[in-house]
Amino acid sequence: MRKASLVSNYLGTEGFPPIKIRLPDELNSPPNNSDSKEDLISRMDQLIQRLSQWESKVNYINPSNKVEHGGFGWLNAREWFDLVGMHFRHHLRQKEELESYIL
């Protein structure tokens, strides 16, 4: 199966499968947890706004123009846009999982 078709398969679902994925050490550095809750909320709002602005543009970009993703291969603008949303939902699921441990 082509790597790009893996993205298409996941897009029909809520995103990545709910499994733990071990990243290579160079990509697995601990997160910077020094940001305040307000900063994180502000950055999330900025991300949502940027995604909203791009949503109407990606369908007009030639789907033959592709950029390589390290894990999924060559993706066009629509696939990259959908991957960002899928990745965002993945982090929201991680957040819910962490909250279940402390609540």
Image: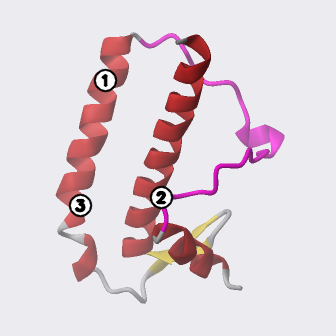
Quick check: can you spot residue 24?
yes
- Helix, strand or loop status at disc 1: helix
- The quarter of the picture where the N terminus appears is bottom right
Relative vertical location of residue 18 with respect to residue 93 in this rendering, above or below: below
Tell whether 37 sits left or right of 2: left
Q: Is residue 67 visible?
A: no
Q: Residue at x 49, y 65 (%)?
A: 13
Q: Which residue is mark 3?
A: 54
Question: In the displayed structure, does residue 37 sit left or right of residue 30?
Answer: left
Foreground tag (2 vs 3) = 2
SS type, badge 2? loop
Q: Name the residue at 62% across, 74% down.
A: 6
Which residue position holds label 2?
14
Compared across the picture, whether 20 is left or right of 65 comes to right
SS at circle 3: helix
Q: Amino acid at mark 3?
A: Trp
Q: Quadrant of residue 57?
A: bottom left
Residue 41: give x, y in percent of width and height: 31, 23
Which residue does the numbered mark 1 point to in the structure image?
41
